[in-house]
Amino acid sequence: MAFHGGAFLKEGIMHQNVTITDVVKRYGDFAAVDHISLTVKPGEFFTLLGPSGCGKTTLLRMIAGFNKIDEGKISFDDTVINDIPAFKRGIGMVFQNYAIFPHLTVYDNVAYGLKAHKIPKEEIPDKVERALDLMQIKDLKDRKPAEMSGGQQQRIALARAIVIEPDVLLMDEPLSNLDAKLRITMRWEIKKLQRRLGITTIYVTHDQQEALAISDRIAVMKGGHLMQIGTPKDIYMKPENPFVAGFIGISNFLSCMVEKSPDPKQTKGILEEKFPVTLPLKKPFEGKVLVSVRPEQCYFHGHEGLNGTISLATFLGDFISYEVTLGDGKVIQVNEYTKETHELRKVDDKVYVQFIPEAVTIYDAASGEVLSC
Amino acid sequence: MLKERRAPDFWSVSRLLILCIVLIFLVYPFSSLIYQSFFTPKTKGPTMANYKDFFSLPYYYTTLFHSLNVSLIAMLTSLVLGLPLAYLMTRYNVWGRNVLHVLIIMSLMSPPFIGAYSWILLFGRSGFLTKLLSKIGVVVPTIYGKGGIIMVFTLMLYPYIYLYVSGAMSNIDKSLEEAAENLGSSKFRRIMTVTLPVILPSIASGAVVVFMTALADFGTPMLLGEGYKVLPVMIYEEYMSEMGGNANLASSISVIVVACSSLVLFLQKLLVANRNYVMTSMRPPEVIKLKGWRRFLATLPVILVVFVSIMPQVVVIITSFIKTRGPIFVKGFSLNSYQSILSRLSQPIRNTFVYSLVAIVLIVILGMVISYLIVRKKGKIGTLLDYLVMFPYVIPGSVLGISLLVAFNHKPIILTGTALIIIISFVIRKMPFTVRSSSAFLLQMDPSVEEASINLGVSPMRTFFKITARLMAPGVISGAVLSWITCINELSSSIMLYTGKTATISVTIYTEVVRNSYGTAAALASILSITTAISLLIFMKISKGKVSVV
């Protein structure tokens, strides 16, 4: 595999794209990764996101060479890597639990890959120093990793992965073992580092906020299948199916019976079996639809809308989150921003909930197809 | 990029190699044993005659009853001794806990027949105390026969119960008992409904080990049994008998012994199935701090048991310094027992250390690779290896000895009478210690550390030597020390395999005792005891309590 010994950490090197074509990983009869195809562009920060067991880590390990590719192929630019053993792929990888060599000093941990790649001896100290410097752990150089904090170990792992100047960097939930505050700091550091090195990065996480914050594009996975690929904004604003709508952020799902109308933009329907609404659809449709409404797309109206009672009010600083129990027992979430209102509603208050029909996503209840414009 | 030809990778080659070794030196001998058990010297073709003889002639089948009888009773008496001891040692601030703990392990790791031998020295027909007491008119009950065997077994094997149970007791999370207390359980109810069920798997494991060790033991019943014959002794006599031994009958008896221990192991698995509780002991139970006479009362039983069980080794060491004239002890102390082993018996000492050392080197190399294959390269062959390699653990030494004999006393491979066959028996029988403790370390090691190395461009083979081997070293070394201790003390297989030139210390002690040369036997036994004690201290230093001796 190409390992370029060029100037280390030169910014904006052209990195490779990663093309995954129809790959399958099976464990017995169970397909952990089921015919997935996607392309990661050179220099892109690409995230595989999904609940545990969705196949994201399996796919990442197939790219790394730790899981065999049962079907399909994976290539870097034009090179198919299926049959290249893991140790010859020249990919950088950061592991969930850091996988620092406990018997080696920080310096030796970082130098390990350079020695394996037969970098001339005299160049090694310089490269290690610069990697340590970049990760701001220069003063830990001669220490053993055993007594170090999770954050420090994470930095060592990063330095060790980037020092070999890999074509592609893989990260397997690298922040999941850190505490909440450090996770956010490291998130930014990883993002900035990746920008600076321009290295093609594939990142695995189950944390949707992290994925939204860090990625150029996200692939949402479920049960070995791809559910949607898109920018964080697309994924959040235009979820292509109810699963993505429910998994990314919070969505209230309301059922609605609609009638065919000559102008689909003015489709009439009955929401939750009693509240008449007009929904903008992209094509004529008749039957049951699913309306997915974000809590922040809802608002309270004086006397019209879905009626219910407040069953829980949570004050969260910048907004207040209300749990509203509708007449039929369904529970939805409604957010009110404190900069817009200072009034705190009380539990058992009767309320009317409305939403902006143009903002919501509407699905065919049977097929999951997107019907909103 | 060129599509490269896949070189046969390191682990596939190792797997194949290990499988061959296991097939030749483990599967082949045991298959030969089973095969031989269906033949007799007189008849042609396979026959059930041996088994028919065994189960119809009282001379044979009574030994089966004897074996089961002493093993079962020894198991119960060991429980009676071991359980309270474990409870006292884990729950109360017994005086000198650490020293007592080490002494208990030492009495377990003593050469297997030293107990018997030392009790003979004290209470045998011409024992020191027998003579002393008979002068004042006290007649000691006989040490020979069933009672003596059971007593020696108990004092030698209760440490298994103690170690298994105290290990489990100190792993119980304190909050478990607190929860029971909080829910309104009395102390007795708590022990019966929470503590006991949770440690039951450990009790069962300990009891089974006691039973199987007792069933397999050769030295003790050989020295003490006299008329009371058990299976391992019968195997030895059938095979070695100067009237023309019967290897076929010995083989069938061996198969019956293995069937017995497998059955017991199976019953234990059945009992423990679905009752293994994974315990993450966040807060180990507190040690209750007793004061004054209460503390004394808690300590006294422990000290008594430990004193009686460690006494054989002390007696043997003292005996080794008693002046002798020929085989007879006389008044005063001297080093003449040691002088006579130096002039006459230095060969067995050299043999013991050379054979054990060679065996340990092989055990370490094979053990590391095997445990890696078992833990990391799962799949059918890994599981098969796991079973095969652990199999000798449940096999009495005499059975292993006889299967090696029947397998390698004819073409294509003739090894009988060589040093190699003894080394092979050491490797096969003592490997499980190293494999188990290496596997334990490997299981705790995160595989992503190895993956990180591979990912950084180091091949799987070099990763194994640069990273994995280094990190599992403490586990390997601890296991190897245990293998070493049991190698130098091995008697039951060596006694079948040795010839004059390849005798080991254990074998020589046995032959010296048979010749009534008690002084030299004691001196040899002391050498073993001291070497064992030193090795054990090294083990504890290295393993730092992470690897259990059981």
Image: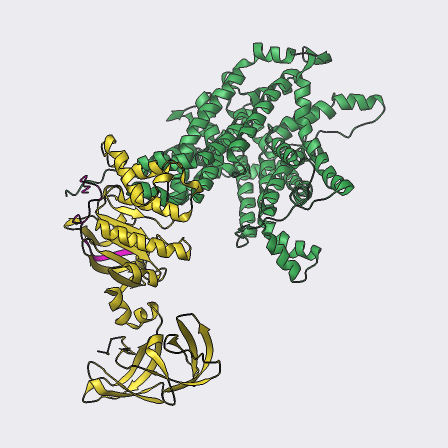
Query: Quadrant location of residue B328?
Result: top right
Residue B91 can be seen, yes or no: yes
Q: Quadrant of the N terminus of chain B?
A: top left
Q: Position of residue B136 (x, y in %)?
A: 85, 23
Q: Quadrant of the C terminus of chain B?
A: top right
Foreground residue, B249 or A330? A330
Query: Which region is colored magenta?
Result: A1-26
Q: Colour of chain B?
A: green
Q: Position of residue B222 (x, y in %)?
A: 63, 28
Magenta part, dominant SS: loop
Foreground residue, B401 or A297? A297
Q: Is residue A70 above or below residue B354?
A: below
Q: Looking at the image, which residue is at 61% across and 10% down? A: B339
Q: Position of residue B516 (x, y in %)?
A: 66, 17
Residue B64 is one of the magenta-drawn residues: no
Residue A23 is one of the magenta-drawn residues: yes
Q: Looking at the image, which residue is at 47% across and 39% down? A: B436
Q: Position of residue A362 (x, y in %)?
A: 27, 78
Foreground residue, B198 or B350? B198
Tell whether B428 sits left or right of B13. right
Tell whether B182 sits left or right of A11. right
Query: Quadrant location of residue A181?
Result: bottom left
Q: How many numbered marks, from 0 up?
A: 0
Q: Colour of chain A?
A: yellow
Tell whether B257 sits left or right of A22. right
Residue B37 can be seen, yes or no: no
